Amino acid sequence: MLAPLLPAQLTRDQFQQISQLVYEKCGITLFQGKEDLVKARLGKRLRALDVASYAAYLDYLEQDKSGQELHQLIDAVTTNTTSFFREAQHFEYLRGQILPAKKATVTGMRFWSAGCSSGEEPYSLAIALQEALPVGASRDVRILATDISGAVLARARMAQYHEVVLRGLAPSLVDHYFSASGASPDQVYRVKEVVRRMVQFAQLNLMDSWPMQGPFDVIFCRNVMIYFDQATRARLIQRFWDLLEPGGHLFVGHSESLNGLSHRFRYVRPAIYVKQAL
Ligand SMILES: C[S@@+](CC[C@H](N)C(=O)[O-])C[C@H]1O[C@@H](n2cnc3c(N)ncnc32)[C@H](O)[C@@H]1O
């Protein structure tokens, strides 16, 4: 079939159906006004499947009992923006406040990067830990990194980044923790084994039940809850509380305070909270 000349039209009703599906599956709220974003992102799925309208696409979704297309839909609507050492103050706090207090008992320290996207966040954590901990100690530190999107997890596991992605990193860190391969402009930098082995990736929808027991010393869930409504955020915050060690820390994105949510965390500084030991 020839590709249609004009982009498919998305009616209000079809947008509502897609929004409802996305909300039920992964908690993401696609607010009114996001129609253009949905069209831009799902247009690619329509072309890949060679379907000409959103009505046909919704039929296809419904009939696809494998759930594959639902995964593709979620991959398409999730926002995966991330970077190495994003919100650098968080890594400063970790280095300056949390790790010094933990050094004596660092063995078995556990971190969770919930909504890790393409890996920059958990690898930044691993590099920060390598830099801060006594030689050998970081081997005992484990970082679980999870995301709903299989596509970003595949990139995270590859651990290969283009030079432009590494621009915010100090050259000494790039030299130390990445190996370059290929020639410019296709040169890529792979995270070294010493860092990769600290991170375990797994696909996990935060709305589902969680297989891990915890407890965690530190949970990073940054720039994820921004897409959820208040009720979903409140539930998630409680579940993070349950999985944290007393004295454990929760880091959220700078635009996502816990204000307005009922919770028991103590505010430490912007976007950092602690589960106070009782
Ligand atoms: C904007 S990125 C944030 C990445 C990283 N935490 C950071 O701050 O740089 C948001 C990530 O949350 C993931 N996400 C969205 N909804 C999710 C859900 N229900 N369960 C798990 N991950 C989800 C997305 O796939 C995306 O990779």
Image (spheres, grey):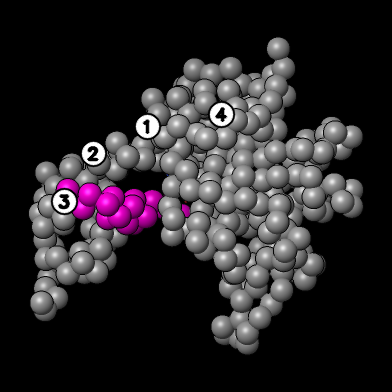
* Extent of the magenta region: 61-80
Q: Is residue 271 visible?
A: no
Residue 33 counted in the magenta span: no
Give percent across and percent down for residue 59.
Answer: 12, 52
**Mark 4 surroundings within 10 Å by alpha-carbon count, few (fewer than 14), some (14 through 19), many (20 or more):** many
**Amino acid at the residue labelled 3:** Gln
Residue 77 counted in the magenta span: yes
Q: Earlier in the sequence, mark 1 or mark 3?
A: 3
Q: Nearer the viewer, mark 2 or mark 3?
A: 3
**Mark 1 surroundings within 10 Å by alpha-carbon count, few (fewer than 14), some (14 through 19), many (20 or more):** few
Q: Earlier in the sequence, mark 3 or mark 4?
A: 3
Residue annotated with mark 2 = 20
In the image, residue 117 above or below residue 225: below
Give percent across and percent down for residue 169.
Answer: 70, 63
On residue 240, which mark appears? 4
Which residue is depicted at the point 57% across and 61% down?
Answer: 157
